[in-house]
Amino acid sequence: MFNRKGQATAVGGVFFVLLMVTLIGLFLYQLDYEHRYVVQSLEAIEKRKKIYNEDLAISEKYTITRSYSASDVSAEVIVINGTLVSGSNSSLIDKGNNFIIIDSVAVVNLTVPGGSTVVTDEFVRNGEFNEGFKYWNLKNGVLGRWIIDVYPSNNNASVYYIRSLPSKMEDKARLSQDISVDVSPLYAELSFKYRITWDWPWWFSPKGFIEVWLLNQTSSTRIFGPRELSSSWTSPTISDLKISRGKYTLEFRVYVRNPSRWFLIRNCKIWIDKVSLVIRYQEDLEGYSSVIYGIKTELNLNLPECYNFSYKLLTKTSRSLIFEVYTFDFKNNIWKLESKFITPSDDWFNLTLSSPRIIIYSESQYSFEISFDYLYVETVELNPSEFILYIKNTGNVEADIVACWVKNETMKAIRYEIKQTLLPGDILEVDIPITLTRGSTYKIRVITRNQVFRFNFTP
Amino acid sequence: MGSKGQSQVVESVLLVMITVALWTIVWVWFYPSYTGMVQGLSRQLSYYEFSLKENLVIEYVNYSGSVLNVYITNTGDVEFYIGSIYVNDTLVWSGSEKIKVDEFKRMNISPYTLDGKVLRIKICSLRGNCWEVIERVQP
């Protein structure tokens, strides 16, 4: 059936098969071992990677807000200027009833005695004829009439105008203004300007004169002239006029004559402008007297030790006032203006302040009242029994919080077990039931599965 | 069949039997070594697995009355044994202290003389993992 060679081949084949099965088994086992090892290693690396992505933000809150009434803080109202009408310190506890009412007193009594002063006034109205002949009285002559004319620089002037002045003819006119001097003049000065113009003939001139009179009921005084008129402006000033209190008429009189036997004069004009009567006189001033009413009140509070505080004092003023609130600067021993405002009239408002010692001051021309109703005090104090630790996961992987430690310079480190997992963004609040000491530095450690986070604070 | 044919069959059967018998002898010799090798690999794999799952956080260190206290927590996934503690690269404690998963433990190193404020503390497990922290320690 088989020869010797065939038998040997069969035996070798069986050996080979058995050997291969064994080797393949060993190979597969080794492969599985390597695979499991690599997987374990990768898992471990993945876990360790978290340490680099783990981050916490730690903060704390060690204060509490407390409210007090006036009696709790021994609030004391001291009236410095003013009259206490009703109420006492205990009134500040009773909301809506039993007010402290303070009436104002005269804080300033001001009397200014009368006196006198020297005043200079213009007594001629419309002296530049810008309003035509308003306030002026006109008296025309036979040949001419008073008109308003304009000369260069757009100035108005009063003009006695004669269209045609025949040979050897003459004419006269008056221009006057009633003046009421109701003062006692110390000095008076009259000024004006005048001239004469004509169109034809050019080879001779008309003869003209001007006079100024000051008339009253009892006398007539020529205070200027007669002066011959010329074709250029003349500006006389009559100083130190003798004038006293009373009614006067200031009168300009003009005269004109044609000296020629043969020729008439065309468009003859006598110009008067810039009439001014300046009087200097003494004016008596009346005395002045005024009373200023005011209230000055001090408020003292005896507050507990705190980080911050504020209080509201429900207040009313009987009229709208400018209210000034001063706070005491303990460092420099002075009162500093804290705020200044206008109060509503006869309506309650809250005076919000943050100083334990204040002065309220207000004044007015009229007497007034200030009412205080209720004092509400709020303080921010050190929490006497605990503080809150806020742990926020600011990393991008979950953080397993194991525990936290608290210690300060004198206190032994205390460990608080937490064992909580925070997802990214989560905040954990941990109440730490210890009594903190102000000014002492507390060292906090927050332990995660991978690392230790440190945080210090000083309440 | 003739007598020649019968003897050939018997011869073949005998040869196969002899082959199997020889292989059995070889296998009996090889199998214990094979099994030992497989078991060794399994143990090594377990060792690596456990080693990778070890983790420790040194939370706090203080010094009081010539005792250095090191507060630790096992934050790994397996329990393990603390084998040695070094301070500033000096072996200050050795032994075998078991620490369970999530267990918080205080390791006392006593007596210890504080020779500096800043200490480099290294804790090693018996599996060879080490964790180190630098602490400012005040008496």
Image (cartoon, coloured by chain):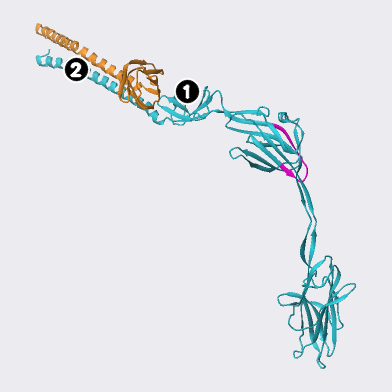
Chain colours: A cyan, B orange
Q: Position of residue A178 (x, y in %)?
A: 85, 71
- The circle drawn on residue B109 is none
* Among the 4 quarters of the image, the one containing residue A331: top right
Is B81 above or below relative to A110? above
Alpha carbons under labels 1 and 2: distance apart: 74 Å
Identify the amino acid type marked 1.
Met
Specify the farthest residue to the bottom: A262
- The circle drawn on residue A19 is 2
Residue A287 visible somewhere in the drawing: yes
Q: Helix, strand or loop at disc 1?
A: loop
Q: Residues within 10 Å of mark 2 (few under 14, many from 20)?
A: some
Q: For mark 1, name the chain.
A: A
Is A174 above or below relative to A322? below
Q: Helix, strand or loop at disc 2?
A: helix
Q: Nearer the viewer, residue A16 or B67?
A: B67
Is A370 above or below relative to B136? below
Specify the farthest residue to the right: A218
In primary-sequence order, the first of circles 1 and 2 is 2
Q: Residue at x 87, y 83 (%)?
A: A142
Q: Position of residue A131 (x, y in %)?
A: 79, 70
Q: Residue at x 78, y 49 (%)?
A: A290
Marks 1 and 2 belong to one chain = yes
Q: Which residue is mark 1?
A: A411
Give the side of residue A5 with respect to residue A154, left or right. left
Q: Position of residue A162 (x, y in %)?
A: 82, 83
Q: Provide the residue span drawn in magenta.
A: A362-374
Identify the amino acid type marked 2.
Leu
Q: Are marks 1 and 2 in contact (CB under 8 Å)?
A: no
Give the side of residue B2 with respect to residue A349, left or right. left
Disc number lying in front (1 or 2):
1
Q: Position of residue A241 (x, y in %)?
A: 80, 73
Q: For mark 2, name the chain.
A: A
